[in-house]
């Protein structure tokens, strides 16, 4: 597979997963948390899929396309380790969907960050709330759910809070 093929496959899988979870939370109230704005691609896709839904973005440094920068009221700027604990009381048990796209080229650092994020975000999710991530999560409160057709196991990860 060429590097171009690989990028296309990764983004196609990511879009399919975001479409799957966006549909799945249709009847579930609560905000969406986007962890990792990056250049704003997935934020833009989620807000297109979920008009009217509050989407709160967590990012340490905004470098997104100008059209894809959330309003100040919906942006928590800083390291996840600081910003997520700061909203724990506000969002506890309410969040319908967490999308965590936090990986970098460093596989072990990406896995370590996901391990750290689990205890910070899972308590924010409502029962039945969903987590979509580029990294695997392991927590007794999470049940893995099926990936969309065509998305290979391990490419993206979808969970429901039991
Ligand atoms: N979903 C984005 C998109 O579609 O454009 C790409 C996100 S990019 C893979 C990961 C982002 O997570 C980067 O913008 C990085 O700055 C942010 N990030 C990584 N670790 C972080 C941390 N500990 N605290 C806050 N932001 C972090």
Image (spheres, rainbow, N blue to C red):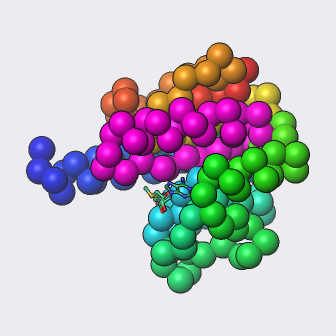
Residue 46 or residue 124, whichever sits in front: 124
Residue 27 or residue 65, whichever sits in front: 65
Query: Which residue in the rendered view is the most extreme toward the right?
Result: 89
Q: Quadrant of residue 154?
A: top left
Q: Residue 102: within the magenta? A: yes
Q: Is residue 26 left or right of residue 115?
A: right
Report x, y in % for residue 98: 65, 44
Q: Is residue 131 left or right of residue 114?
A: right
Q: Residue at x 74, y 67 (%)?
A: 74
Residue 27 or residue 89, whichever sits in front: 89
Q: Residue at x 60, y 75 (%)?
A: 69
In magenta, the rendered stretch is 96-125
Q: Main secondary structure of the magenta part?
A: helix
Can I make out residue 99 in this image? yes
Q: Residue 105: within the magenta? A: yes
Q: Quadrant of residue 78?
A: bottom right
Query: Which residue in the rendered view is the most extreme toward the front?
Result: 82
Report x, y in % for residue 10: 33, 47
Q: Image height check: is 144 above or below 81?
A: above
Q: Residue at x 53, y 83 (%)?
A: 66
Q: Quadrant of residue 54?
A: bottom right
Query: Which residue in the rendered view is the most extreme toward the bottom?
Result: 66
Can I make out residue 49 in this image? no
Q: Image height check: is 73 above or below 1?
A: below
Q: Is residue 34 left or right of residue 147?
A: right
Report x, y in % for residue 19: 54, 47
Q: Quadrant of the C terminus?
A: top right
């Amino acid at each position: 597979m060429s590097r171009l093929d690989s990028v296309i496959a990764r983004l196609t899988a990511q879009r399919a997963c975001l479409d799957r979870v966006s549909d799945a939370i249709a009847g579930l109230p609560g905000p969406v948390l986007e962890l990792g704005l990056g250049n704003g691609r997935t934020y833009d896709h989620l807000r297109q899929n979920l008009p009217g839904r509050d989407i709160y973005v967590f990012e340490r440094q905004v470098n997104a396309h100008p059209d894809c920068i959330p309003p100040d009221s919906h942006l928590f700027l800083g390291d996840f380790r600081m910003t997520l604990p700061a909203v724990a009381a506000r969002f506890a048990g309410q969040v319908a969907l967490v999308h965590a796209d936090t990986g970098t080229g460093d596989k072990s650092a990406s896995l370590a960050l996901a391990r750290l994020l689990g205890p910070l975000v899972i308590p924010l999710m409502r029962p039945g709330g969903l987590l979509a991530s580029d990294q695997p999560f392991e927590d007794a409160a999470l049940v893995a759910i099926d990936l969309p057709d065509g998305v290979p196991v391990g490419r993206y990860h979808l969970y429901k809070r039991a």
